[in-house]
Amino acid sequence: MSRRRGLAVALLAATLPLMSCSTVPTSSPTVQIPQAPARPAEAAGIEPLPPAPGASAEEVVRTFIDASASTVTGHPVARLHLATEEAETWDDATGISVIGSDYATVTTDSGTVLITANLVGTVDPRGVFTVAGRGVFTREFRLQQVDGEWRISDPPDGLIMLEPDFERLYDELQAYFLDPTTSRVVPDPRYLLTGESQPTALVERLLAGPSAALAAGVSNPLNGAQLRRSVTVEDGTATVELTGMPADSPLLEQVCPQLVWTLQQLGRRISDVVVVVDGEPVTPERIPERQTVEDWASFDPDAVPVDGVGHYLDAGALRTAVEGRPTPGPAGEGVYGLTSAAVSADPRSGRLSFLAGVRPEGPGVALLAGPYDGPLTSVLSAATLSAPTVPGTREEVWVVQDGATVVRVPAGAPPQPVTAPTLAGLGRTDVLQLSPDGVRAAVVVDGPEGRRLYVGTVVRSPEDGAVVLRDLREAAPTLAQVIDVGWRNSSNLLVLAGDESRDRIVPYSVGVDGWALTRVTTSGLPSQPTAIAVAPTRPALVSAGNTVWQLAGGTWTTLVRGAQPLVGGAPFYPL
C-alpha cells in the first residue's frame, strides 16, 4: 500500500542542498517566513499555469516554483518561465529540493529575485530522501526581458517544490533488500511520482541497488539482473520479466520475496506477482507461479513473536503488560533487581528464549544474560550501561558501555566490541535501539548541541564476524532534548523529545529517513513520559509518573482498561 505522509510539526531547514546554485548556510537558525501568500486549496490536483502576461519578476519566480508540481514529463510549463536558450538546456531530472510553503521572495538592489525558505529535504534521482539540517535555504534568480516579458535566465538544474505539492504528487514506497541472514526483507524508502509507471519504477530502484546509507548492511540478489520490458499489471497480476540471471539460480528464492514484498505495496492494483526469467516463469519449490506476500511470510520485515507482549519492570521484577503478571523464573520474582531489560525470541521457534538485563552492582552496573525463564549470569560490568536492545533476527543483546563503547553479547558467548568509528565524536551515547530486522540502529547522543537522534547502519562481515555501526546521520534535526526512541516498525520511529512551545517531553513519529515528523498525542497521560516502547503491530507503551500506559484509539490508557494504572517503568517489547 502506498503511503503519502506529511511533516505536520516541524519546518526542517537546510544543510544538504541538492542544487549546485543554492546557498545553504549551516549556522543559521530555522526561520519563520511570513511573506508568502496562502495558496488556494483548489490548486491541488491541477496542472500549473504558464506565467501571466505582464507578470513581475517575483511573480515569474513564484509561478516557476509552482510549475515544478507537474506530472507531465519534462515540465513544459516550467520551461515557459525560462529564457529561450535556458528552456532548452534546463535539466529537471537531477533531483528535488523540497521547501516549506511559507517562503519569501525579495527583489534585490541588483535586480535579482532572492527566495528564502526552510528546506525540508532533498530527493535524489533515485527517489532517496535526505532530511535537511537547521540552516536556511536561499536561491537568487536572474531574469531578463524576452519579448517584453520577464523570464529566468539562470535556472538551477532540478526542481524546487513546495512541501504540500511534494506530498500530493509523490508516494513513499519501500524498495526491499535482504538482511545478512537472508531471512527478512529490509525497507529502503523511496519517493515516486504517482501514476501507472510506479511498478516499473520500483523494480528499477531494486535493480539499481540500495541507498548509499543502507548499502553496506544489506544484500541485493537482483544485482546484475535487468528488466526485459516494463512491468505489466493485468487483472491484479504484476509480471516482472528479467534477464541476466539463470532461471534455476538458488538466488531466486531470495529474488522472489524481494520482488513480491516490493510490488505488493501497491495493493489496490497488485494482488500477486509473476516472475519471468528469460521468458520462463519462475516457480520456486512449493511456491505457486502467482506469488503473494503470504507465500513469503517468513521474510516479513516486521515479524514479532506471537507471545511478544509488552514487558516492564516493577521494583526490579520483570512483568508483562498482561495485567502486570510476573514473567516465569527468577527475573519475574525480582531476584536480580533489574533497572532495564530486553528479551529476544528463538528465530526458529518464535518462543521467548533469551533475556538480558542491567542491575546495579557495586559502584557501577552489570549486564546479566541467560534464558528467559531461567537463571542469569553477569557478562559485562561498567560504570554505566544503556538499556539493552535486541534484533529480531538473532539471539544477541547490544548495550553502550560508559556512554562511548558499543558492545554486543551473543547468547552463550562472551562480549564482543562493535566498531562505531564516528559515534564517540558526536558526544555521549545514552540510548541505542536496534531495528526489528537488525540492520539499523537508532541512537540518542548527548553532544554539544544537546540530545540528538541519529540512525546508523549495522554492517556485519561474513569473513571475520566483525560488526560495525556506521553511516550515522541525524534523523530529526529539529528535535531537541531527545530522551528515548523505539522502532514502530523497520522504517518508522517513535521518539520522546522536547516540545519547545510547551516546555515538556512529548512523543513524535518520524520515518527512518527523517520524513513525516509528526507529533503524537499525550491525551490521557498523567505526567510527562520518561521512557517508550514500541514494536510492529503492537500498541505503544510509555512510563509516566512511575506507571505504565498504552496508546489505544488516540488516547493513552491504563494497561488494564478501567483499572488503576500499574506501577512500573522501563517498558519494552521482545523481538
Image (cartoon, grey):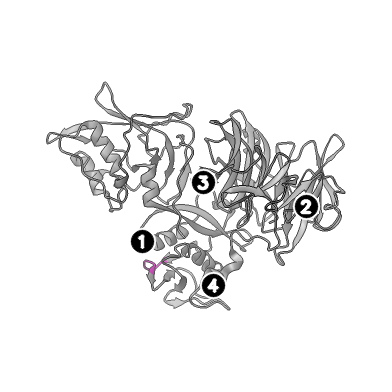
Residue 463 in the image: state x and y as whole percent: 67, 56
Q: Is residue 164 left or right of residue 449?
A: left
Disc 1 to disc 3: CB gap under 8 Å: no
Quickly name the residue at label 1: 197
Label 3 sits on a secondary structure element that is loop
Q: Which residue, given by chain and number where applicable, does mark 2 sit on?
A: 319
Disc 3 target residue: 513
Amino acid under disc 1: Ser
**Judging from the image, what secondary structure is the residue with disc 2 in?**
strand
Relative depth, front residue between 141 and 162 = 162
Instruction: Pick the quarter of the image with the C terminus.
Output: bottom right
Circle 1 packing at 10 Å, graded few (<14), some (14-19), many (20+), is: few
Q: Earlier in the sequence, mark 2 or mark 1?
A: 1
Q: Amino acid at mark 2?
A: Arg
Q: CA distance from mark 4 to mark 2?
A: 48 Å
Real-space CA distance between mark 4 and mark 1, rounded to the nearest whole angstrom: 28 Å
> For the residues carrying marks 3 and 4, which lies nearer the camera in this image?
3
Please tell me which residue is depicted at 61% across the width and 28% down the height of the picture. 448
How packed mark 2 is, by other alpha carbons closer than 10 Å (few <14, some 14-19, many 20 or more), is: many
Nearer to us of marks 4 and 1 is 1
Residue 75 image position (x, y, % from top left): 27, 48
Q: Earlier along the polypeptide chain: callout 1 or callout 3?
A: 1
Magenta stretch: dominant secondary structure: loop
Residue 315 against residue 187 in the figure, above or below: above
Neighbour tally class for label 3: few under 14, some 14-19, many 20 plus, Cα within 10 Å: many
Location of mark 4 (residue): 249
Q: Magenta segment range? A: 227-232
